[in-house]
Image (cartoon, rainbow, N blue to C red):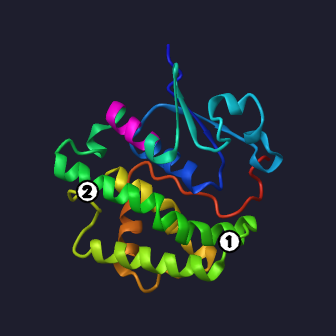
Amino acid sequence: MSHGIRIYSFPLSGHAHRVELFVSIANIKHEIVYVDLPSGEHKKEPFLTLNPLGQVPVIEDNDIVISDSNAILVYLARRYAPDFLPSDPMLEAEVQKFLTLAAGEIAFGPAAARLITVFDAPFDAQFCQIVAEKALTKLDTLLANKDFLVGGRPTIADIAVYSYVAHAPEGNVSLDKYPNVLRLLSNIENLDGFKAMPRTAVGLYA
């Protein structure tokens, strides 16, 4: 009997949180294996056999291994939760647009700004703030009169943008100017199965 999806994760990784959040909301059977990033476990075997790039998240679905958080979301939705990835070509293209936003301006804006404050990453804070403002302005505009990003219901587009946008204030990126974004975050947090990402490293391995 399958154990369900095995997710290799780290509690403070927004990329990993996307996957944990999705399987929880979509009620996909899973187990979580936390990888000790502070001690470098992700850069050693046996983890490097799973993902030679040495990054979380990674999932194992029996003999299938997939890395990259957005690729994982697409796979899990297609295979186990099709309601979260529209089959209509136009709506699917809309979802892809937000996956690109999540991997681009959100990653280089609010996500990178948070990496500076939480993990002491050597990025340019001013540049991250500029990119974050651009991404959040775009997101707020696209959310006008919408409860969710695509098709009036939750999709993996919402999951992909949630983690780093919700935690943008940790990187000194204010969300106060973006009421539509705040409404989206609230709508996601009110979904059955919602799982928050921790805001501190204290007690992660207790």
Which of pointers 1 and 2 indicates the residue nearer the eye? 1
- The amino acid sitting under disc 1 is Phe
Q: Establish if 114 lies above or below 176.
A: above
Q: Quadrant of residue 81?
A: top left
Q: Nearer the viewer, residue 135 or 19?
A: 135
Q: Which residues are magenta?
A: 72-79
Kindly identify which residue carries mark 2.
Answer: 94
Mark 2: secondary structure: helix
- The span from disc 1 to disc 2 (Cα, nearest Å) is 30 Å
Q: Quadrant of residue 73?
A: top left
Of mark 1 and mark 2, the one earlier in the sequence is 2
The x and y percentages for residue 123 are 68, 71
Q: Position of residue 56 (x, y in %)?
A: 62, 44
Report if residue 167 is visible in the image.
no
- In percent of width and height, residue 180 lies at 33, 76
| Residue type at the position of mark 2 | Glu
Name the residue nearer the viewer: 11 or 57.
57
**Which of the labelled discs sits on residue 9, or is there none?**
none
Near mark 1 (Cα within 10 A), the count class, few <14, some 14-19 or many ≥20, is: few
Which of the two residues, 73 or 51, is positioned nearer the viewer here?
51
Label 2: how many Cα within 10 Å (few below 14, some 14–19, many 20+)? some
Image location of residue 101, percent across then percent down: 40, 62
- Residue at image position (52%, 63%) is 107
Furthest residue to the top?
1
SS type, badge 1:
loop
Q: Kindly report the secondary structure that dominates the magenta region of the rendered protein.
A: helix
Q: Which residue is mark 1?
A: 123
Q: Residue at x 61, y 83 (%)?
A: 126
Relative side of 72 to 168, left or right? left
Instruction: Based on the picture, tell me whether residue 161 belongs to the magenta stretch.
Output: no
Is residue 152 something one can see in this rendering? Answer: yes
